[in-house]
């Protein structure tokens, strides 16, 4: 015959074991769930961080101005856009005078440029012109036609500038669009600054930070 005292003790021990096991399983399940939440949150949090590609797209572009000869156009890129840089000669600068009546937006009121380029030159200095090299009509790439003169392609008294062969838009040596062009506004001036006397930084409004 089983001793009732021993039976009661055995039942109590079993209950303690079950309670301990239950507490262990509960804690283990909670811990596992917490770990799962952490791992699930990693891709979500990471998705808010800019990728290397995104950072590269916004990184400023530096250009050594010493490599550009007077009268020369060079092309670089910023945010996957072609950037035209022209070292204008005094003759190119002079060509901007007296043609306002032939332009759609001579004072760039409807066109895009930083405040420091809101002038006839559309630039920080007379010497260097910086433009986004895509036509404001349909995004084609205008060609340099810097030599002034009369031609069947560019019309009478061409002062020099840019010509888009796709649809015939014409722009002067400040990127201002001529009347009769399909493009309605001037070429866009990107943010840029000079770092010292020979370095151009595209994508910043000053030498300290990105735009």
Image (tube, rainbow, N blue to C red):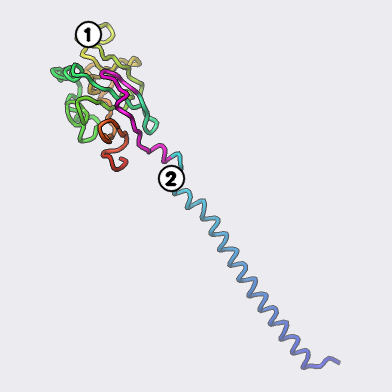
- State the residue at coordinates (27%, 36%): 195
- State the residue at coordinates (26%, 39%): 206
In the image, 36: left or right of 62?
right
- What residue is disc 1 on? 149
Residue 116, x across and y down, in percent: 20, 34
Which part of the image, by quadrant, shows the N terminus? bottom right
In magenta, the rendered stretch is 54-74
Asked if 39 appears above or below 67 in the picture, the reply is: below
Asked if 166 appears above or below 44 in the picture, the reply is: above
Q: Tell me, yes or no, whether the highlighted magenta stretch contains residue 57.
A: yes
To which quarter of the image does residue 25 belong?
bottom right
In the image, 35: left or right of 193?
right
Residue 157, x across and y down, in percent: 19, 9
Extreme left residue here? 98
Out of 152 and 74, give the one closest to the viewer.
74
Out of 65 and 45, give the one closest to the viewer.
65
């Amino acid at each position: 015959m089983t001793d009732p005292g021993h039976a009661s003790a055995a039942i109590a021990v079993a209950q303690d074991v079950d309670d301990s096991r239950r507490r262990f399983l509960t804690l283990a399940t909670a811990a596992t769930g917490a770990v799962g939440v952490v791992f699930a949150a990693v891709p979500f949090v990471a998705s808010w961080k800019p990728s290397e590609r995104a950072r590269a797209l916004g990184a400023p572009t530096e250009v050594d101005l010493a490599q550009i000869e007077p009268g020369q156009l060079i092309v670089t890129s910023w945010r996957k856009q072609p950037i035209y840089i022209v070292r204008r000669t005094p003759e190119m600068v002079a060509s901007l005078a007296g043609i306002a009546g032939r332009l759609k937006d001579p004072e760039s009121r409807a066109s895009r440029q930083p405040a420091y380029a809101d002038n006839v030159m559309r630039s920080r200095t007379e010497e260097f012109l910086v433009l986004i090299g895509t036509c404001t009509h349909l995004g084609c790439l205008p060609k340099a036609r810097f030599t002034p003169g009369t031609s069947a392609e560019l019309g009478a008294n061409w002062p020099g500038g840019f010509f888009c062969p796709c649809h015939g838009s014409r722009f002067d040596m400040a990127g201002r669009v001529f009347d009769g062009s399909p493009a309605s506004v001037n070429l866009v001036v990107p943010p840029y600054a000079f770092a010292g006397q020979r370095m151009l930084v595209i994508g910043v409004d000053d030498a300290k930070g990105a735009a």
